[in-house]
Structure formats: C-alpha cells, structure tokens
C-alpha cells in the first residue's frame, strides 16, 4: 500500500500563485508523490522487479569497488 498524504497550500493575496506552485512541487518531491506515480505508471511482474533490483545492486557494488580502487 502506498502512502496517503494530503498536500494543502493556502493561497491569498499576499502569496503569489507561482510561488505556491513551486512550494507544491517541492512538497510532492519531499513526500515521494512523483516517485510513487512513476512506479504505478506501468505494471511490472514481480520477477522483473526482482531482476532489476539485483542489477541495480550489482551496479552499486561495481561503482563502490571502482571508487575504492581509485582512492
């Protein structure tokens, strides 16, 4: 189950709309709304998710080893 957040930004005469929009985007990023949206955009089989997860882990390990050997 995903997280359920309500993002509310009050706008009045003193608070311009473009500033409120930037604040809203920042909140969406902080709460992971965009990440969750991209995750749900298309269905991936659990086996494919597991394979991608293992590949990402291997990529991180290889990068860590490269950095370790360099310095």
Image: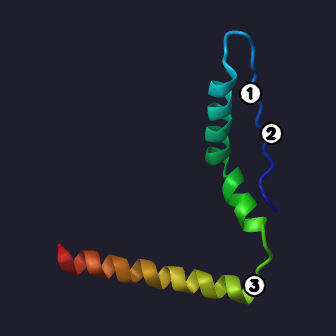
Q: Is residue 34 left or right of residue 2?
A: left
Q: Residue at x 34, y 76 (%)?
A: 64
How far is mark 2 from mark 3, CA to CA?
29 Å
Residue 48 x/y as whole percent? 69, 87
Q: Residue at x 72, y 59 (%)?
A: 36
16 or 27, which lies in front?
A: 16
Whichever of labels 2 and 3 marks the residue nearer the N terminus, that label is 2
Q: Which residue is mark 2?
A: 6
Residue 7 x/y as whole percent? 76, 37
How far is mark 1 from mark 2, CA to CA?
10 Å
- Name the quadrant containing residue 5: top right
Whichever of labels 3 and 1 marks the residue nearer the N terminus, that label is 1
Mark in front: 1 vs 2: 1
Q: Which residue is mark 1?
A: 9
Q: Residue at x 65, y 40 (%)?
A: 25
How far is mark 3 from mark 1, CA to CA?
37 Å
- Name the quadrant containing residue 52: bottom right
- In the image, farthest residue toward the front: 18
Q: Which residue is mark 3?
A: 46
Asked if the residue at tag 1 contacts the one at tag 3, i.e. Cβ–Cβ closer than 8 Å, the answer is no
- Classify mark 3: helix, strand or loop: helix
Name the mark on residue 31.
Answer: none
- In the image, farthest residue toward the top: 14
Badge 1 crowding class, 10 Å Cα cut-off, few under 14, some 14 to 19, many 20 or more, is few
- Classify mark 2: helix, strand or loop: loop
Mark in front: 3 vs 1: 1
Q: Is residue 62 left or right of residue 17?
A: left
Badge 2 crowding class, 10 Å Cα cut-off, few under 14, some 14 to 19, many 20 or more, is few
């Amino acid at each position: 189950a995903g997280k359920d957040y309500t993002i509310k930004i009050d706008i009045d005469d003193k608070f311009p709309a473009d500033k409120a929009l930037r604040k809203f985007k920042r909140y969406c990023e902080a709460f992971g709304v965009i990440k969750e949206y991209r995750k749900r955009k298309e269905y991936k089989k659990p086996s494919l998710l597991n394979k991608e997860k293992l590949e990402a882990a291997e990529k991180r390990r290889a990068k860590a080893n490269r950095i370790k050997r360099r310095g």
